[in-house]
Amino acid sequence: MTTTQTDETAERTCYLPMWDEASEEFHNGYLIYRTGDPFFVRLEIEDWPAPVVAPRDVLRDGVTGRAECLSKPDTTALRVQPSPDGKYVLFGITQGDLLLGVFRTYADALDKHLAGLYELVPEGEEMTRIDWDFLIACMCARDSK
């Protein structure tokens, strides 16, 4: 776990070992969390074409039960749920109704990392931490493409 801090915004990167459910291939996974965008976590998986952005509550709820965020047909989203034995958490990457891939990671490692994210920004304090200038700049950059 690595934390960097600039002014009022901290970024934490947490390492997650991940396995592709279809091929059993190992991948390095990273959760990236910015306190300036406190509702969302980026999931980056080695050799996966693009990061997946999901609410941190979806990850937390997915440790003990099925949780997912919805996506537009042209964007990726995440479906999270515990494995039948509870040892792992399954990450289903979706695009609309299409399941693109399923990865698993250790439930206890994910739970530990999520606890650290909620220490950085406790539940209910998210609105006071939002970096509005950064978010507006991102939206303007996206709209100009």
Image (cartoon, helix red, strand yellow):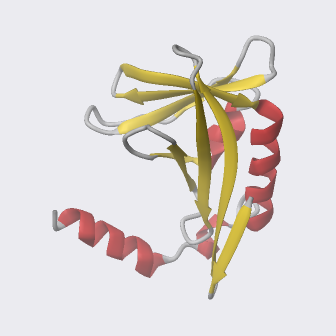
Query: Hey, which residue is sitting farthest left in the picture?
Result: 145
Relative vertical location of residue 34 with respect to residue 19 in this rendering, above or below: below
Residue drawn at the location 20% of the way across and 64% of the way down: 143
Q: Is residue 71 left or right of residue 59?
A: left
Q: Quadrant of residue 2?
A: bottom right
Residue drawn at the location 64% of the way across and 65% of the way down: 126
Q: Nearer the viewer, residue 22 or 9?
A: 22
Quarter of the C terminus within the rendering: bottom left
Q: Is residue 141 left or right of residue 9?
A: left
Residue drawn at the location 74% of the way across and 24% of the way down: 88
Percent across and percent down for residue 64 are 76, 27
Numbered-mark total: 0
Q: Quadrant of residue 1?
A: bottom right
Q: Nearer the viewer, residue 42 or 126?
A: 42
Percent across and percent down for residue 127 are 60, 69
Percent across and percent down for residue 55 are 56, 47
Residue drawn at the location 80% of the way across and 13% of the way down: 85
Q: Is residue 145 left or right of residue 66?
A: left
Relative vertical location of residue 120 with respect to residue 77 in this rendering, above or below: below
Relative vertical location of residue 86 with respect to residue 112 in this rendering, above or below: above
Percent across and percent down for residue 46 are 51, 41
Q: Is residue 61 left or right of residue 112?
A: left
Q: Nearer the viewer, residue 132 or 17?
A: 17
Query: Hey, which residue is sitting farthest front in the picture?
Result: 25
Relative vertical location of residue 110 with respect to residue 99 in this rendering, above or below: below
Q: Nearer the viewer, residue 43 or 22?
A: 22
